[in-house]
Amino acid sequence: MITVKADEGQVYEAAKHSGVFGLQKLTEADTQRISVNYSVFLPNGGAELSSSPKERVYYVVSGNMKLTGDGKEHILEAGDMVYIAPGEQREVTLLGNKACESLVFIVTP
């Protein structure tokens, strides 16, 4: 069992992201296949269109964001989540002038 306190984690910069504060709460070094990141998308922040070989789940804690992918726009608000399959492209755009806090769960095959 691993406990991670609210003030624990490692600051990181995610590739192809801008205006995002990231904090790694769990990494693959801690677990067998999963990483958990706490991300704060600042106004005008987001992530470029890209894909990954890993599964991802975004859970919005507060604020709202738009994920564009699979030919659709997905608007997420607090309490919403989205599953992104391996290889699926997605782009993240912050909506509004307030930061958006999210937890990102990443599963390694």
Image: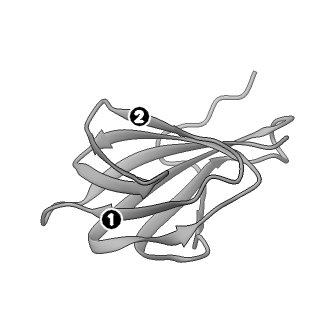
> For the point 33% across and 65% down, which residue is it?
93
Which residue is at the front of the view, 91 or 30? 91
Which residue is at the front of the view, 58 or 26? 58
The amino acid type found where label 2 is placed reads Met
Q: Is residue 92 above or below residue 6?
A: below
Q: Which SS class for mark 1?
A: strand
Q: Is residue 70 above or below residue 50?
A: above
Residue on which the image places disc 1: 93
**Disc marking residue 53:** none
Residues at marks 2 and 1 touching, judged by CB atoms closer than 8 Å: no
Q: Is residue 48 above or below residue 84?
A: below
> For the point 48% across and 48% down, which residue is it?
7
Left or right: residue 85 versus residue 96 is right
Which residue is at the front of the view, 67 or 106? 67
Residue on which the image places disc 2: 81
Q: How is the image coloured?
A: one colour
